Amino acid sequence: MLTFLGFAMIATFLVLIMMKKMSPIAALVLIPALFCVFAGKGAHLGDYVIEGVGKLAPTAAMLMFAIVYFGLMIDVGLFDPIVRGILRFCKADPMRVVVGTAVLAAIVSLDGDGSTTFMITVSAMYPLYKRLGLSLVVMTGVAATANGVMNTLPWGGPTARAATALKLDAADIFVPMIPALAVGLLFVFALAYVLGLRERRRLGVLALPGQKAPRDVAEAEEVERTERTEQTERTERTEQTEQTESVEGDLVAAAAGSAAHSGSAGSAAPGATTGPTPAATPLPTPTAAPGSAAVAAPEDGFQGLDPDRATLRPRLYWFNAGLTVALLAAMIMELLPIPVLFLLGAALALTVNFPHMPDQKARLAAHADNVLNVAGMVFAAAVFTGVLTGTGMVKHMADWLVGAIPEGMGPHMALVTGLLSLPLTYFMSNDGFYFGVLPVLAEAGAAHGVSPLEIARASLVGQALHMSSPLVPAVYVLVGMARVEFGDHTRFTVKWAALTSLVVLAAGMLFGII
C-alpha cells in the first residue's frame, strides 16, 4: 500500500506542476499532506514536517547566504570579465551561446556546489538569452545537465556518500570513472551544439545592437572575414594618410617660409600667388562598412551586465576575487560547515564593499526576492521529503524495486544499479539512495561475485538526471533566477538528462569500468 501511495504521490506532483495546475511550493506542501492522510498517518504529519525542516534547514541557510554572497559579487563586478569573455566567444550566434552555457556551467561546477554554479551561469547568460530571444529552458536544461555530470566530483557529494555507505575509498570509486564521465561531458557539449543549431534555425543568425544581422551562417562568416580585411585596410590607409600629411605639412611650412622671405625682400617669384598657400587635401577617410561594428560589439556594445552600474567596486576587485577563492577552498577542504562559510563570507563582503548602512540595506533588498523564493521552496520540499521518509514510503518503494530484480540479473547487478540510479536518485534524495538503497544493491551484487566498487561507480551515473529532481534545492535557484516555470524545465530537461546518464553508463561498461 505504501509503495503504491509513494509512486502515486510523486506522479501526482510531477503531473500537476508540468501541467501548471499548481505552483511548485503549493504542490510540495499540499500533495504530501493529502497522501499522508490517505496513508492513515495524518496525526503524525506535524512530526514528519518538523523532521524534514530540521534536516533541510542547513541547506536553506546555505542557499540564503550563498545567494546574498554571489549576488554581491555580481553587483561589484567580480564576474564581469567572465561575462565579456563569453560574449566575445558567442558573438550573438545562438549555437555559440548555448555551447558557451554548457562550458561555463561545467567550469564553475568544479567548486562542487550546484547553487553556486547556477547563480554564476544564469547571471552571466540570462541577459544574452533575453536580448537575443533564445529559449530560457534550453539554458536551464544545459546548465543542469552539465552540472549533474560534474556533480560526481569527490567533493560534490554523491561519490563521498557512496564511499561512506560501502566503506570504500572515494578515489578508488571516482578516478576509474573519469573516462566515462568525460564521455558524458562531451555528450553534454554535443547536445548543447545540437540545441544551439536548433535555436539558430528557429531565430536565424542574429546580431547585437549596432550590428547588421546576416541572412545566414555563410553570410555571417563572409561578413566577419570582410570586416577583418576592411579593418586591416583602414589601418594601413590611416598610417599612409598620416605619413602623407606629415610630408605635405613639411612642404607647406617650407613654402610658407620661402614666401614670407620673398615678401620681406619686396619681390615675388614669377607666377607666385599672393596670399596663403592652400594646404594639401588629405586622402578621404574611409567609412566603416555596414556591419563592421560586429567586431567590437561584444566589447563596446551589449555587455550583459551594466558596465556603468553604481555598485561596481573596481578597486576591490582583487580583494573580492581572493575572498571568493578562499571561500571555495575552505568549502572544498571542509574547514567549516558550508552554511557557516557563506554566512561569514556574505557578512564580510557586504561590510567591505558597502560600508554605509543605507547601501547595505539596498543590496540586501535587491536580492531578497531570490532569497525568499529559494528558501520558501526548500522548506516546502521539506514537507515532501518528510512525508516520504516518515511514512516509510521511500523504504517500501526501494524494497519493491530491489525485489523486482529477476534472479538471473544477479551477475549484472552493476548494470542494474546504474539503471536504477536514474529513477531512484530523481525521486529520492542522495542520502536516501546512497545510505538506504545502495548497501542493499551492493549486498545483492556481492552474492553473485560483483565487486562493491563496480556497484558504487554505477550508482553515480544517475547524477545528470538527479540535478533536475524536485527534491534538489539548487534546481530552484536555477529556475528562479532564470524566471522559468519548474514544470517547463522538467518537461524539457528530463529526457536529455536521462540520455546523458545512459551515455555515461554505456561508456563505463564499454571501458570495463562498470
Image (cartoon, helix red, strand yellow):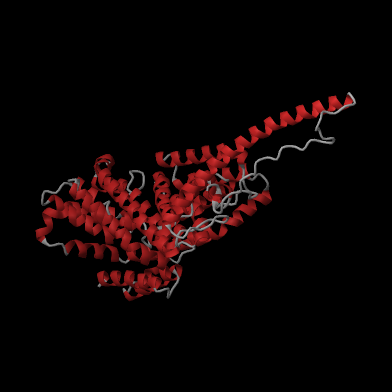
- Give the total of numbered labels: 0
Viewed as shown, does residue 344 lie left or right of 475?
Answer: right
> Between 27 and 335, which is closer to the camera in this rendering?
27
The correct choice, above or below, for 204 with respect to 123 in the image is below
Viewed as shown, does residue 62 lie left or right of 14?
Answer: right
Q: Residue 397's spot in the image, x, y percent? A: 25, 65
Asked if residue 33 shows in the view, the reply is no
Asked if residue 159 shows in the view, the reply is yes
Q: Residue 456's spot in the image, x, y percent? A: 23, 48
The correct choice, above or below, for 126 with respect to 162 in the image is below
Viewed as shown, does residue 335 lie left or right of 504?
Answer: right
Identify the residue at the far left of this view: 408
The correct choice, above or below, for 238 with respect to 26 in the image is above
The quadrant of the image that shows the N terminus is bottom left
> Between 267 and 218, which is closer to the camera in this rendering?
267
Identity of the residue drawn at 63% across and 50% down = 309
> Between 396 and 137, which is closer to the camera in this rendering?
137
Identify the residue at the far front of this view: 270
Q: Residue 410's spot in the image, x, y percent? A: 12, 56
> Between 503 and 320, which is closer to the camera in this rendering?
503
Q: Residue 336's spot in the image, x, y percent? A: 45, 42
